[in-house]
Image (cartoon, grey):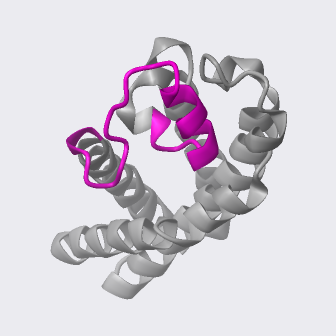
């Protein structure tokens, strides 16, 4: 596999991920159940004190649909990445995909969540603008990337590796 291609893919994947996440987490879209689901529980509770409560659990059909679409989208993007990087076997594709998913999880947590989400007012839910400390909860986001994020990554890696195996 070509390391230079993989490094370029990491940068492009981060750009694509950012282009998807920022619009989905700002404006009126941040008030959808699948977006509210990604906020820490104390922010959700404060928000629902003044707004109608909606199901934002992992069992919510909106959250399930969003996560399922994410799996399909990431599988398609990363299948292309594996092809361009030269992955030819199930395990090459699996480990490359899992590595790229781990990378995007770290990027999302350390930059998007800890820096942008925590500090930019555009991501604050109405009625929670005063909760600076709650928006800076690093442990909440780190737990999310470890689980269920790693399970999400393993699922995408397995699907991408199956696609690679079927193509070759």
Horizontal arrangement in the rendering, residue 109 relative to residue 19 (left or right):
right
Residue at 37% across, 42% down? 56
Q: Residue furthest front?
A: 49
Q: Is residue 154 left or right of residue 60?
A: right
Residue nearest the observer in this picture, 127 or 97: 127
Residue at 75% over, 42% down? 134
Residue 126 visible to the viewer: yes
The stretch of residues the image draws in magenta is 36-62
Give the residue at x 45% y 22%: 31
Left or right position of 137 against 98:
right
Q: Is residue 64 magenta?
A: no
**Vertical position of residue 161 compared to residue 149: above or below:** below
Q: Is residue 17 above or below residue 123?
A: below
Q: Is residue 86 visible?
A: no
Q: What percent of the width, then of the height, locates residue 128?
A: 67, 25
**Which residue is at 33% across, 57% downward?**
75
Q: Residue 148 location, x and y as percent? A: 46, 67
The reply to whether the magenta stretch includes residue 57 is yes
Residue 144, placed above or below residue 46: below
In the displayed structure, 9 sits above or below 16; it is below
In the rendered structure, the answer to whether residue 140 lies left or right of residue 21 reads: right
Instruction: From the top left corner, tell me how far across and down residue 153 is, in percent.
Output: 44, 68
Q: Quadrant of residue 69?
A: top left
How many badges with numbers are in the image? 0
């Amino acid at each position: 596999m070509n390391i230079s291609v993989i490094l370029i893919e990491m940068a492009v994947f981060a750009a694509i991920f950012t282009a998807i996440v920022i619009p989905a987490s700002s404006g009126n879209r941040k008030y959808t159940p699948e977006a509210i689901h990604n906020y820490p529980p104390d922010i959700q509770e404060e928000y629902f004190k003044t707004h109608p409560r909606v199901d934002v659990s992992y069992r919510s059909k909106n959250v399930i649909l969003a996560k399922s679409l994410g799996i399909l989208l990431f599988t398609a993007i990363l299948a292309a990445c594996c092809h361009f990087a030269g992955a030819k076997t199930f395990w090459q594709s699996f480990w490359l995909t899992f590595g790229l998913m781990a990378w995007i999880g770290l990027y999302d947590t350390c930059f998007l969540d800890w820096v942008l989400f925590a500090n930019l007012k555009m991501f604050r839910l109405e009625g929670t603008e005063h909760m600076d400390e709650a928006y800076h909860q690093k442990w909440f986001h780190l737990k999310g990337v470890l689980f269920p994020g790693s399970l999400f990554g393993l699922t995408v890696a397995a699907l991408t590796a199956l696609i690679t195996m079927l193509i070759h």
